[in-house]
Amino acid sequence: MQTDSKQMEWIKKLLGGCKPAPCEEDSMKYLIAGLGNVGAEYQGTRHNIGFMVADALAKQADAPWSLERRAYRTEYRLRGRTVVIIKPTTYMNLSGEAVRYWLQAERIPLSNLLVVVDDIALPLGTLRMKKQGSGGGHNGLKNIETLLGTTDYCRLRIGVGNNFGRGQQIDYVLGTFTPDEQAVIQPRIETACKAVETFVTLGPDRAMNSYNK
């Protein structure tokens, strides 16, 4: 029995360097990262449109949030796929820390990542999905690009408009939507959820063709 035990220990050591499951990415898992800032003072602000989409996705799937490492996290099943949603708790400028961590922790391939962000360069409510590109002045995307070492990941930009004067950009994006803006943005959040789920089930090209209008 002693010899058998030693043999088993040797086999475990031999195989322990790379077990099959942890070394393989799961092509049926998707990471949806809605960007924003945590805290009551940021709730409902234009910069938090990514959080709003993440919340809407979780609500329609009846998926409860839990506070985990570097993010609020939830998941649900969609047509045989696992959709993992995160809202980073790192604040916007360090969003890449949460995105990188959860990509690695869930073994999700980069092609299955979709980041949802606000964009002042787009008219209010306009949706634009792209498969790659620069951060375009968005600090959250810049940090993701830095920590992932690439710009080759999908992002869904949601226009929040640029109705602000010179030097007022920060106040604008950290301000809440006006009632008139809310009337425009709420149905667009619902459309953004459809775009996200099309990305998951049919791929980015189909989602771009359907929702980049």
Image (tube, helix red, strand yellow):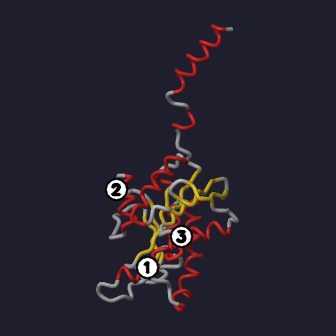
137 lies left or right of 9 = left
- Identify the residue position indicated by label 3 in the image: 51
Q: Is residue 128 visible?
A: no
Could you tell me which quadrant the N terminus lies in?
Answer: top right
Q: Position of residue 141 (x, y in %)?
A: 39, 64
Residue at image location 64% in from the left, 66% down from the top: 58
User: Could you tell me how far apart the alpha carbons at marks 1 and 3 are, in whole angstroms?
Assistant: 13 Å
For the residues labelled 2 and 1, the Cα–Cα distance comes to 24 Å
Q: Nearer the viewer, residue 111 or 23?
A: 23
Residue 193 place in picture, x, y as percent: 58, 70
Mark 2 or mark 1: whose residue is earlier in sequence = 2
Task: Give the crowd class for mark 1: few <14, some 14-19, many >=20 residues within 10 Å.
Answer: some
In the shown orientation, is residue 31 left or right of residue 175?
A: right
Q: Nearer the viewer, mark 2 or mark 1?
A: 1
Residue 37 horizontal side relative to residue 141, left or right: right
Relative to residue 25, is residue 121 depicted above or below? below
Lower sequence index among marks 2 and 3:
3
Q: Secondary structure at mark 3?
A: helix
Residue 54: % across, % down: 57, 67
* Of callouts 1 and 3, the N-terminal one: 3
Amino acid, disc 3? Phe
Does residue 19 show up? yes
Look at 36% across and 88% down and name the residue there.
Answer: 164
Q: Nearer the viewer, residue 212 or 116?
A: 116
Residue picked out by circle 1: 174
Q: Amino acid at mark 1?
A: Leu
Q: Amino acid at mark 2?
A: Thr
